[in-house]
């Protein structure tokens, strides 16, 4: 079993969890050609993907959804609100096999449990995924703050993909118009490096050990800034990298390395 990010930024998000033989694609914010290339780099034939789970309807998560789902005959899972929004926008056409995911459900050999995320979309979710081995994985991007439901969803996950979207100073001093800065910083926007670090602290405290930071803003963050923010904050809480936890930043535009999960 392994986790591989295909792309992870405000420009596009998609990741794969499974084995070389089969697994789930989480979000499809990547064009079908790039998807095929990225899966090839990850070492997984696109034909072996079994399902797509979608967090929400924003284009950076669904731009390749229709093409990939139809081309490979994949079932698409999402919350009622997300599916309705995707159909309304014409991103899903009804040609796809669509399933509403509101409760824990077995998908491709995993138990997938959705949890709501506070974000300015119809009904966005993150996912808690239980593997047969007893390990669990959390996938959580696009959230304005770590709500109780988010923390409950991620608590106890061995491996967590968490958003570290923006650096507060870069956003405030950056070129975005005031309304957009306000939207990103709001409780229904995105998670800052500070909020990400504080969330990781709580998760480490409850036993999570492996983190990958994703969905970095292209304009308002840098990989080294996101990483040092969390590492330094946690060191101040006597939680040390490579002793208490490991942490990596996912590449924004390319397929990342495979993270093995037993
Ligand atoms: Zn979003
Ligand atoms: Zn997004």
Image: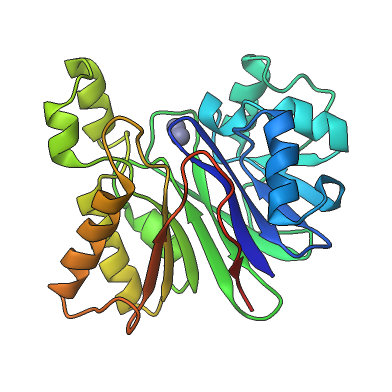
- In the picture, residue 120 is in which quadrant? top left
Q: Quadrant of the C terminus?
A: bottom right
Left or right position of 251 against 102: left
Q: Residue 96: x, y in percent? A: 82, 29
Q: How many marks?
A: 0
Residue nearest the observer in this picture, 215 or 152? 215
Horizontal relation, residue 129 to residue 19: left or right: left
Return the x and y of residue 224 as percentages of the image width and height: 28, 52
Residue 218 visible in the picture: yes
Q: Nearer the viewer, residue 164 or 195?
A: 164
Q: Residue at x 25, y 79 (%)?
A: 240
| Ligand 2 location (quadrant) | top left
Q: Position of residue 207 (x, y in %)?
A: 39, 80
Indicate whether 7 appears above or below 154. above
Q: Is residue 100 shown to the viewer in this render?
A: no
Direction from residue 165 to residue 111 in the image, left or right: right
Query: Which residue is at the front of the view, 124 or 50?
Result: 50
Where is residue 33? Give x, y as percent.
Answer: 73, 30
Judging depth in this view, the residue of 61 and 246 nearest the camera is 246
Give the residue at x 71% y 44%. Answer: 52
Figure quadrant of the N terminus:
bottom right
């Amino acid at each position: 079993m392994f986790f591989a990010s295909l792309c992870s930024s405000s420009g596009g998000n998609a990741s794969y969890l499974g084995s070389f033989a089969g697994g789930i694609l989480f979000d499809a914010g990547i064009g079908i050609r790039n998807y095929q290339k990225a899966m090839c780099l990850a070492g997984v034939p696109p034909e072996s993907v079994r399902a797509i789970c979608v967090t929400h309807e924003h284009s950076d998560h669904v731009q390749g959804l229709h093409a990939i789902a139809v081309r490979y005959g994949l079932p698409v899972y999402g919350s009622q609100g997300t599916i309705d929004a995707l159909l309304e926008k014409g991103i899903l056409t009804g040609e796809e096999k669509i399933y509403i995911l509101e409760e824990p459900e077995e998908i491709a050999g995993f138990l997938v449990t959705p949890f709501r995320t506070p974000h300015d979309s119809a009904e966005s979710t993150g996912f808690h995924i239980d593997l047969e081995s007893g390990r669990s994985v959390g996938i959580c991007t696009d959230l304005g703050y770590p709500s109780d439901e988010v923390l409950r969803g991620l608590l106890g996950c061995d491996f967590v993909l968490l958003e570290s979207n923006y650096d507060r100073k870069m956003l405030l001093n950056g070129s975005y118009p005031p309304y957009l800065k306000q939207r990103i910083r709001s409780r229904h926007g995105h998670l800052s490096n500070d909020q990400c670090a504080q969330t990781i602290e709580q998760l480490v405290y409850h036993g999570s050990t492996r983190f990958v930071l994703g969905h970095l803003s292209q304009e308002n963050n840098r990989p080294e800034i996101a990483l040092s923010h969390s590492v330094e904050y946690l060191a101040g809480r006597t939680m040390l990298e490579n002793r208490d936890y490991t942490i990596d930043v996912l590449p924004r535009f390319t397929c990342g390395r495979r993270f093995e999960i037993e």
